[in-house]
Amino acid sequence: MNYRDSRRNCGPETATPIYVLKSPFNEKEEFLLNDGKRSDDRAPLEVRKMYFGVSNISQAKGSSYVELGSTKVVCGVYGPKEMAPSSIFKSTGQVLCEVKVAPFSSYVRRSPVPDRQVKELSMQVKDALEAAIILEEYPKAQIDVFLTVVEDSGGVLAACVTAASLALCDADIRMYDIVVAASVVSVQEEECIARAGERLATSKSSASSTEDELEGSNGSVTVALMPLYANGQVATMVMSGSVTAAKLQDGLDAALETCRKVYAIAKQVCILM
């Protein structure tokens, strides 16, 4: 007899297990192997496997579960609700975004107390959502977005933006367009990896970086895109490290292309809600 625990989010049947006894990152490991495949047996231009689910948290007005490769994020949306009397008055709505990272989400155990990196992640996701939500439709109201990173295998900002956007759609929050994100990572002088839905863009072009590749990178950029609004409106862009202008342009092109692929899947999920 098949039994499904309705009190827990089981996720897809093919979910990748969390880190248990996995060896740490080896800096000398080759990202592209001799046979042209990545270390996870993907082709250079192959996007990581994705899974999008919605309505997985019964207490939330809208919720979502997103997998990008081994990166897993759960999101819950509450509201819109009346703002507290002590809040600063604004004629438009406000977004409260909070990201938490599970202690077991990566090789190194994370503290349950949000650190500077997690707080920055919350602000970056908030910036993308504020550009996508029609805040004028929710005067004097607040929309709460809570995200939990269950497993971080790289590209967590892109996964959080996509998960939050799907949860907002599930909550019937009015938006200009679904916002999806992709990250691009420069790994070597001739390589640039895009991930977020992800993919690897290089002078030789490849797709989708893992956490190991991110650790060995010297620059990255994440782009959040609303493909159908204003002929492709960029909601936010976050860059770290340093790359040449030519590599940055190649990476942006790869990230935007990947965003459109992720958008097609996200749109189908929203239609089938």
Image (cartoon, rainbow, N blue to C red):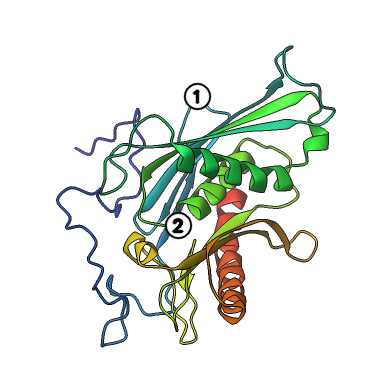
The quadrant of the rendering that contains the N terminus is top left
Q: Nearer the viewer, residue 260 or 189?
A: 189
Height in image: 118 above or below 38? above
- Mark 1 residue element: loop
The quadrant of the rendering that contains the C terminus is top right
Side (left or right) of 136 relative to 122: right
Question: Whole-percent x and y of residue 247?
Answer: 55, 79
As drawn, the residue found furthest toward the front would be: 242
As drawn, the residue found furthest toward the left would be: 21
Question: Whole-percent x and y of residue 62?
Answer: 57, 34
Question: Whole-percent x and y of residue 201?
Answer: 50, 77
Q: Residue 59: which disc? A: 1
Q: Earlier in the sequence, mark 2 or mark 1?
A: 1
Amino acid type, label 2: Gly
Q: Which residue is mark 2?
A: 155
Q: Nearer the viewer, residue 16 or 105?
A: 105
Label 2 close to label 1 by CB (< 8 Å): no
Q: Nearer the viewer, residue 253 or 47?
A: 253
- Mark 2 residue element: loop
Height in image: 127 above or below 262? above
